[in-house]
Image (cartoon, rainbow, N blue to C red):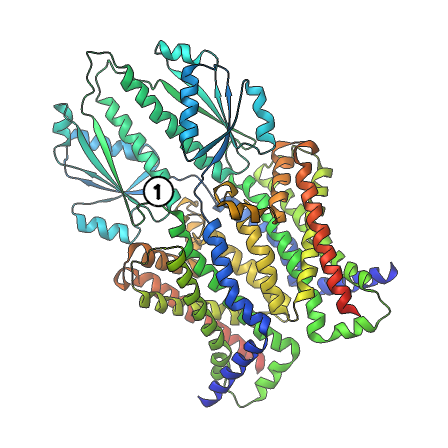
Amino acid sequence: MRRVRFLIWKELIELKEDRRLFGIVILAPIFQLFMLGYAATTDVRDVPIVVADADRSAASRDLIARFEASPNFTVVNIVTTTGDIDPYLERGRAWMALAIPAGYGGRLERGRPQTVQVVADGSDANSTNVALGYATSLVAGYAQQLAVARLPPGVVVRGGIDARVRVWFNPRLESRDFMLPGVLALLLLVITTNLSSMGIVREKELGTLEQLNVTPLGRWELVVGKLLPYALVGLVDVCLVLGVALLWFQVPLRGSVWLLFAMAAIYLLTTLGLGLFVSTISSTQQQAMMTTTFFFLMPMIYLSGFIFPIENMPAVIQPFTYLIPLRYFLVILRSIFLKGVGLDTLWPQAAALAGWGLAILALAIARSRKRSA
Amino acid sequence: MRKMTAVARKEFRQIWRDTRTLMTLLFLPAFFLLLYGYALNFDIRHVRLGVDDRDHTAESRALVSAFVNSGYFDLAATIDDPATTKRLMDRNEVRAVLVIPSGMGRAIQTARPVAVQVLLNGDNANTATTVMGYALTIIRSESARHQPAAAPAVPLVSVEPRVWYNPSLRSTLFLVPGLIAYISMITAVVSTALSIVREKERGTMEQVRMAPLDAASFVVGKTIPYFAVSLVSALGIIVVAMALFGMPMRGSWLLLLLALSLFLIGALGLGLLVSSVADTQQVAFQLAMLASFLPTLMLSGFIFPISSMPRFLQLVTYAVPARYFLIALRAIVLKGAGLDAFWVDLVALLAFAIVVLTLASVRLRRQWV
């Protein structure tokens, strides 16, 4: 036990001596969280739209005014023919174009159904999809108002079905409240897995790992002593990130903070286990970095549900997402933050995460034994 | 010149011998494109719906089947008490719940207004907004079925959506530019930085400095192999996207190469700058991540739209080279635009490259002597 303490102490001193690394480990998460807190919103606001108004009537201006009033759109210019919109879309000055045909106002007056064209730049499929939805529902709402206004005097609108929508967990539909907990998980992964794997491989590269191997330290003591400092760094980062998220960005935390920390500790088990595992299969820091970023970081970003919802993936791919530990931690974090649920609901995720962590740690330790033998 | 090629050859041999790194750099990106091209989808379909039907009439069943037949919702659970609703929502087993009050059928027959309730899981705001749109549309059209014939059956104004450049809104086409930017950043910035800092860490930098070699040839020689590898990897991604996902190539290859090279040179410059600041590979890696990886992923407009960001952050994105590269790449590949449409972006890439290369060479030269 005392020997482990010394090893931890040595690691912490090394970390502190390396002033730059120390600064980065403490400051980088806060910096990144600020950046991401503002940037990582999937809401689409102020979509630049160009209008080709071939009609120039009161009715067409009325429709344009709807787009101008909507927070989702910013009208960049009003041109006359559809030919004029090309340069706007081609240069990316507008993402969308609304084309109102000539005679629009006149036909509307006579109560004939009308079609306006919405042209969208599909090169950014994600935003386009969302923006198209906004445009469609804006026009649909407008059409409904027109229809009610035009009902013949004798006809009364009958009851019909009305929808009362209630949004649970995130009533203001803030995507930041959803993204920030995910950012916490991602930052922990980037920092702890990479730092620990590169830290161990560094000793290999410099030849000092051999020296540690010949000391009377046991295998477990070595692993614990090497990884625990990084776990501490990780927990400090959790505190920092949590502070910024709660105090600055005012993300609601409806569940228990202690549960959050306990879960973060389990998660750190998997990220550090991964770091140790990567260090056993790499002989240079460059290799360790490549392996972590390409084989672990990238799949985790894309397939964990961090940005792209798992439910939208094809059924063939979905089972593979169960192999990704971040998936479980994301569900846990988001549930604790937004839903305020406890362990009674989250135990399957917690168990999966713990299982993952123990498995990768065991694998890494088994590999490191073979090597030093 | 000869000295420079000697350094390049040495560095290249070193990469070549590390088979895993080489394979990772060259082939993994294209493989990822395959995987993510299939996996990532922006279409929201098969939303898991729970139904709490307290009415059990022909009308309520018609409403439920309107939801199911829309193709957007899958009936995941039939619920008969509010506690179950809470449990299913908490566990993500359903994303939306439709609550039909008892007496709905009766109300419709007697032409009285009636409200049904739609509960949505709002944790992912984007998905929730879309699902809300689906639900409202379905309920509106069901409601219209029960309206008198005098009311217009078709809406007076409707939208005919058309999507240019990427009509089926395929995510592959959207991913390719992002992936190239990402991969180039990793290979160019991080690898370059690590390869130089490694020499510092191991003490071989002293030997290099003693050798009859000037700073410029050392730096250029060091970066050429990474430039080549990044270029090959990026072209690999483009070829895979064209062959397997039908990505068009509407513009000129020459322009594409130009944009790619400018972007890569900037990235290499950034890597050199990082290497001049860092003394250990760990620091170099974290710095490179901070300076390249996260901005490229988050601030380039690749995933999160720039126009939705707050003003000051939008200003920051002007310093992210991936932003310009993304615009140029989409313009060339998808829009087939000519140089007049995006020359500004190429100039910005060039300016970025010049600035970081100057800074890096000043710092490195100071350390050299």
Placement of B187 over or under B119, stated as above or below: below
Q: Amino acid at mark 1?
A: Ala
Left/right of residue A118 with respect to residue A139 in the rendered view: right
* Picture coordinates of residue B200, whole percent (x, y): 71, 72
Residue drawn at (67%, 53%), measured in percent from left and top?
B267
Q: Quadrant of the C terminus of chain A?
A: bottom right
Q: Nearer the viewer, residue A195 or B28?
A: A195
Residue drawn at (60%, 68%), measured in percent from left and top?
B283
Rendered image quadrant of residue A203: bottom right
* Picture coordinates of residue B167, whole percent (x, y): 52, 31
Left/right of residue A236 with respect to residue A207 in the rendered view: left
Q: Quadrant of the N terminus of chain A?
A: bottom left
Rendered image quadrant of residue B314: top right
Left/right of residue A288 with respect to residue A360 in the rendered view: right
In the image, farthest residue toward the front: B312
Q: How many marks?
A: 1
Q: Secondary structure at mark 1?
A: helix
Placement of A174 over or under A111, stated as above or below: below
Left/right of residue A163 with respect to residue A219 in the rendered view: left
Placement of B45 over or under A110, stated as above or below: below
Rendered image quadrant of residue B255: top right
* Picture coordinates of residue A175, whole percent (x, y): 40, 47
Q: Nearer the viewer, residue A122 or B77?
A: A122
Neighbours of disc 1 within 10 Å: few (<14), some (14-19), many (20+): many
Residue drawn at (60%, 54%), measured in percent from left and top?
B28
**Dot 1 falls on which chain?**
B
Tell me if residue B202 can be seen: yes
The residue wearing badge 1 is B128
Tell me if residue B18 can be seen: no
